[in-house]
Every structure is written in C-alpha cells, then in structure tokens.
Image (cartoon, rainbow, N blue to C red):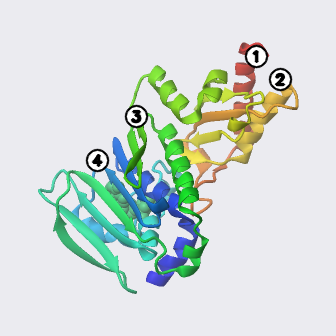
Amino acid sequence: PQLANQIAAGEVVERPASVVKELVENSLDAGATRIDIEIDKGGAKLIRIRDNGSGIGKDELSMALARHATSKIASLDDLEAIVSLGFRGEALASISSVSRLTLTSRTAEQAEAWQAYAEGREMAVTLKPAAHPVGTTLEVLDLFYNTPARRKFMRTEKTEFTHIDEIVRRIALARFDVAFSLTHNGKLVRQYRGVSESSQRERRMGAICGTAFLSHALAIEWQHGDLSLRGWVADPVGSKAITDLQYCYVNGRMMRDRLINHAIRQAYQDKLGNDHQPAYVLYLEIDPHQVDVNVHPAKHEVRFHQSRLVHDFIYQGVVSVLQEAGA
Ligand code: ADP
Ligand code: MG
C-alpha cells in the first residue's frame, strides 16, 4: 500500500501548499468554524492544521488513513452531485505515505481523544490515547523525507511558504464565516476572524486582495434559474499588482476555469475594449448535478454539463454590472 499511495501522492501532493489545501478542505468538510495552520520551514519541516470540526471517531481513524476510504460519498448518486470538497479518499493516505503524519481527533461523543499513525510498507496504523478538544489536528512532519526525488523539487523555504500563503488566502476568501490563522516559524502571518455581514466580508476581501482591487471593485449579484453569481470584478487600470488576481469558486470550491475567465474577459472587451484585464473574485453557485468536479485528482478543474449556458450567464452578469457602472 505504501508504494501505491506514494504513486497517488504524485498527483495530489505536489508541494507543501497542496498538503495545506487538502487538509484545510477536510477541516471545512468537517464543519470547522476555526482552522489554525502552523508551518515550519516552508512546510518542509512541519505542517500542522488544527480544527474544531466534528472530529473522527476512534473506530474510523484507521479508515481515514486508508486509500480510497472516504466518509463523504456513499453511492453513485452522491458522486453525481458532490457537495463536499473531498470525495476521493486519497489525500490522507497519500500524504501519510510521503511524510510522518499523525492524526489526533476527538468527537463530541467520546470522552477522550485518539491519535493515529501509519508506518511501514503495509502502512499499519497504531492508535494511542491523546489529549485534544473536539476536533482534529493533522501533523505532517518531514514531507517527502522518503521520496528524495520529490524532495529535490521543493524550492526555497520562502517560495514554498508563498505558495502556502496564497492557498490560505484563497480559501479564506471562500469561507468568510470561518476563522483562519496562519503561522510561519512561530510568527503569526495571517489572521481572519469569522464574519457574516457583507460589510465585514468586504473588509476581509480588501485585506486579502489589497486596496487597489478593493477601490476598483464592482459588486456583482446576478441570478437566473438555479444559477447564481456573486462577488467582485475590478478593472485595475495600470496597477499591475492585481492583474493576476483571478479567483473563482464553484459551489465553494476554488477553481481555475478557462470558461469562466473567458466569459468575464469577453464581457470587458465588448463593453470597454481590448486593453482591459479584469481581476475578479467570483462565486458561482450551480446545481451540483450540473457540474463534474471529478476531472482531476487535485480537483481544481470542473466540467459544466451545459457550458454554453454557464458562459452566457456569467457574461450577462458582468455586462450588466459594467453597464450599471456607466460603461
Ligand atoms: P476525502 O476528503 O476525499 O474523503 P481524505 O483522504 O482527505 O479523503 O480524508 C479521509 C477521511 O478522513 C474523510 O473522508 C473524513 O472522514 C476523515 N477526515 C479527514 N480529515 C478530517 C478532519 N479534519 N475532520 C474530520 N474528519 C476528517
Ligand atoms: Mg479530503
């Protein structure tokens, strides 16, 4: 199992930032409202994620570390309409096969917490009692220590941390209601309180995206049938710093999507001309039956069943906001 898991890890765990992404997504799936992320040496030494989610029962701990074991999909029907961020049951097994991973967790029903650790070629799981409040801590030490080729591909501490920071900021934009903190080498780098009101959301958005984006941002609220689009678009006019700020979320999942990007640019070009490079933070909500997220192991691509419809919907939404703004 260790070798098979290491091969799978090649697809899911590219670098420390991908570990952070998978673990934070697990915390969100577990309903956490507070997630604390601690990093040492760009993640090469330590990645520790602590959440106050539902926790994992003692009897489920070994399963959580096994490959293709997910508690989130029970049937083919579930797979047709995925509502959780995870569904492949691959991340923990993969990460654990290329690091020293310990999983400590407690559910509300249990009086005590348990810690699990998998090792050796058979990935045998050892369990022992531990101290932990309700929720889960994942600790990943010495990433890629046993896969020297991958370890060689890691860049400097600073570069790897920059990638982690980027992932955390993007996830913090996906869930305003969740509190996040990010610490590097013992120093608190980011801290976001969980917020609900839209003015507070805008403040977090400004803190993450910067004042250049915030001051040019046009808010979008657009709806048609069961499609909805919210968020902000901004035309940075000359402020280069934000031209690569193109964040989009489909049903809460961060995405790189050509179709969405194309629709937005098309709207800008048709309304304002060729030399505009819109930056955006957009949230698309769509019936989960209408989208396939099981396209790539890292889950950052989607396929829309009716891509033309989605494209035109987004195009119209952006056009109407630009018109309102006087374009
Ligand atoms: P997936 O997220 O695709 O289900 P993972 O390998 O990421 O697969 O996680 C395996 C399982 O471990 C999850 O299905 C979930 O049951 C459990 N799990 C992982 N992380 C957490 C967490 N932070 N809180 C609660 N349960 C978790
Ligand atoms: Mg997962």
The answer to the question of whether label 1 and label 2 lie on touching residues, with beta carbons closer than 8 A, is: yes
Q: Dot 4 lies on which element?
A: loop
Mark 3 sits on what residue? 177
Query: Is residue 1 visible in this depiction of the protein?
Result: no
Mark 2 sits on what residue? 271
Which amino acid type is shown beneath numbered disc 4? Asn
Q: Residue at x 70, y 31 (%)?
A: 313
Which amino acid type is shown beneath numbered disc 1? Gln
**How far is disc 4 from disc 2 in space, using C-alphas?**
46 Å
Q: Dot 3 lies on which element?
A: loop
Query: Is residue 123 visible in this depiction of the protein?
Result: yes
Quadrant of the frame with the C terminus:
top right
Front residue of this view, candidates 81 and 243: 243
**How far is disc 1 from disc 3 in space, using C-alphas?**
31 Å
Q: Looking at mark 3, is its residue's CB closer than 8 Å to ligand 1?
A: no
In terms of sequence position, does the residue under pointer 1 or pointer 3 come before the other? 3
Of badges 1 and 3, the one in the foreground is 3
**How far is disc 3 from disc 4 in space, using C-alphas?**
14 Å
Relative to 65, 316 lies left or right: right
Which amino acid type is shown beneath numbered disc 2? Lys
In terms of sequence position, does the residue under pointer 4 or pointer 2 come before the other? 4
